Amino acid sequence: MGMFARFAVLGSLLLVPFYAQAWASTQADRDWQAYCRSMAKRANAKTMRQCYPKTGRCVTLLASGRIILMEVEDVKGATIARWVCLDNAHGDVRRCSNWDTTASFTDMKDKDGVWRTVPTPGEESEAE
């Protein structure tokens, strides 16, 4: 089962903080937090979180409309990767770009509704 396959909805507000502004060490961190706060204020915003004990990672999603913000953390709570994703109009393909690097990947929903990373021609993938 893929990393993005199942998430428990925690509510319509940002319940899992993406760390306080005071802890931000770089402009990219401050921009990420500002973007998360802006997304969380949208009426249809949903926050979801799922942890994977086998890999020692947790993924927090903040979704509003077709835009998804995704933060991957290790067991100590350190951020491993931050992604901004955009679903297509049908909701079965999403393109994600790493907030901090130029890496990107594409996910596609299979017949069972499970998200799977698929090759993107001509681009290198760094999906977590």
Image (cartoon, rainbow, N blue to C red):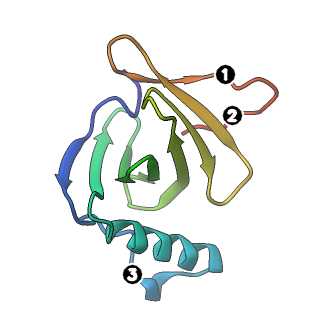
How many labels sit on residues?
A: 3
C-beta proximity under 8 Å, tags 2 and 3: no
Residue occupied by mark 3: 20
Residue extending farthest to the top is 111
Residue occupied by mark 2: 125
Q: Is residue 23 above or below residue 68?
A: below
Residue depth check, mark 1 versus mark 3: number of the one nearer the observer = 1
Q: Between marks 1 and 2, how big is the CA–CA gap?
A: 8 Å
Q: Quadrant of the N terminus?
A: top left
Disc 2 marks which amino acid? Ser
Question: x, y percentage for residue 89?
Answer: 48, 35
Q: Closer to the camera, 59 or 108?
A: 108
Q: Earlier in the sequence, mark 2 or mark 3?
A: 3
- 10 Å crowding of disc 1: few (<14), some (14-19), many (20+): few
Residue occupied by mark 1: 119
Quarter assignment of residue 109: top left
